[in-house]
Image (cartoon, coloured by chain):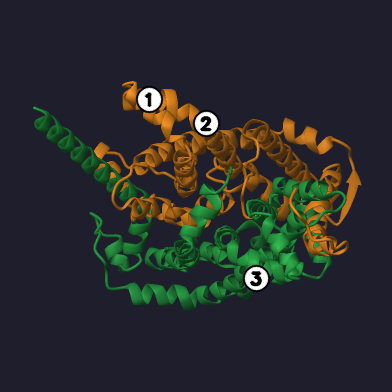
Chain colours: A orange, B green
Amino acid sequence: MRSKFPNKPLPYILLFPTLALCAIFLYYPVIQTFRLSTYRAILMGLHRKYIGFENYIRLFTSREYIHSLTITFIFAVGVVVLGLSISLAIALLANHKIRGARFYRLLLIWPYALSPAVAGSIWLFLLNPTAGVVNYFMKALFGISPDWLTSGQLALLAVTVAAMWKNLGYNIVFFLAGLQNLPGEILEAAKVDGAGPWTTFWRVTFPLLSPTTFFLLIMNLIYAFFGGFGLIMVMTEGGPNKATNLLIFNLYQDAFRFHKWGLAAAQSVILFIMVVALTLIQFRTTGRRVHYGGQ
Amino acid sequence: MAASKRSTYWYRKRLSFGFIHFGLIVTAFLISSPVLFALIKSTQTTTQIFSYPPTFAIGPAAPENYSIAWRDYHLGKLMFNTFVIAGAVTVGKTLMSLLAALALVYFDFPFKNLLFIFVLITLMMPIPVRIVPLFDLVRSFGWGNTHWALVIPFLASATGVFLFRQHFMSIPGSLVDAARVDGVGPMRFLWQILVPMSMNTVGALAVIQFVYIWNQYLWPLIIIASNEKQMIQIGLKMLTGAGPEGMLNWGVAMAGTIITMLPPLIVFLLLQEQFMRGFALAEEK
């Protein structure tokens, strides 16, 4: 038992600012979101009318929303699968004890500090048909120069790659940390038993690393659902023809361009349910880790 | 025999280290190449940028491009705003989380764990899941289009409380006894003993918070209406939107992009040791 300070009121005073701000700016708006999702805004949001679950029914029968769900799903799978496999490969390479390891590590993780909007702006330029460099290489290597941001499927691919690239630093940090926390004796034992690097990786390293991988899987899913806004805003504004209209962008448009408050609140509730589900799964499986973000 | 075997071993080891160095250099280059490309192009004239095949040499237009981005697109002003806001939120969050963690680890009181969970649950409440009521609430306080809206709602930090609580629990409890014997009160104990022992966590948290606030997009976009009060990420959109002649000045746009990314990058590089030790490596222990 750890010894404590005996003061009675002080702990409440110390906790009060945090608790009060959580209640006012986090809990209260979330609860209001649930309530608001059962209303319809009329006259540009000046009045509202109770409509029960109608907003949800409207969303799930709307082609546009289902489309937005589908492409968000594709986007998320792309960000997760590409992002995790590439960053795991890089982390394995950077985990060797060689001279300058710390310097290399820094060179690999610094994109952590870039914002989605910055990533969007750079990729917008890279993919530009005349000034960008991607099509120069495409033409030189394959003889094609695709119009990335005017074709729907290519635009979705482009924003997926840009978002994945931006998150590589974050993933590499955690994979490296996970690799360094692995019990050295087991890896040593595998080596003594004559297991090659390939077998060691799949039979020993990868299973032992699975808590980190799973943690990153959830974090990347949450990033894909919420983190893409600035990137979409700068690169495509949801276009062409709604091909990159991710859920978060759709929510923004309904709320702040079309003033459909109730419909937007219902979309917030759906996103909230997804986050809660993902967080619970992660808590159940990897235990004490908490998803860190800016909050 | 043995000697030659050993030398082959050394030779092989050397060779594989060579491959690893080579692989790491190539990978680091590939990861960085989009930013390097942006950096080079931010120094070129429009003619150089549109030349075919593309040139990858530093151009003469850096002073012009950067000063246009800084002055004509008001990035200087936006950068100042963002600095003040990100700085205020980072300091405020750190202080509030330190106080909360002090209460949670060094005091006994009813409902302690419940209150900790109450704070922790807010991790599941990112801005988009509460955006419409938050917008109404903040405006009803009269904070619409003010910097209060960008600071006050962000001061509570579940990540901060969690990290400091975790770190404090790893510090031996005998320290409290010693402090109490010497008549040191809880606040002096926090500032003079705990904080100096927690610099890794402080640094890690500062990086996470500063980068998060600096890189925010959605909330400032909707709550701030006037351009001179706006944050820098939204300014980026003005640079990459079409210019007056419908033609984008890519050199200026990339100069602005580089300016926008620099401050969080510098904070990250300065505090990267603390970030690695206090954030990623230290957990799960």
Circle 2 Cα neighbour tier, 10 Å, few/some/many (<14 / 14–19 / ≥20): few
| Quadrant of image for the N terminus of chain B | top left
Task: Decide which of A197, A244 is in the foreground and name it.
Answer: A197
Both labels 3 and 1 in a single chain = no
Q: Quadrant of the C terminus of chain B?
A: top right
Q: Residue B192 shows which numbered tag?
A: 3
- Looking at the image, the residue that sits furthest to the right is A50
Coordinates of residue B129 in the picture (x, y in percent): 73, 47
- Residue drawn at point x = 24 percent, y = 45 percent: B22
**Foreground residue, A246 or A83?**
A83
Q: Chain of mark 3?
A: B
Kindly identify the residue that appears in the image at 76 percent across and 55 percent down: A3
Q: Residue at x 36, y 44 (%)?
A: A94
Q: Are marks 1 and 2 on the same chain?
A: yes
In this rendering, the label closer to the viewer, 1 or 2: 1
Seen in the image, is A216 located left or right of residue B188?
left
Residue A165, how many percent across, how many down? 44, 46
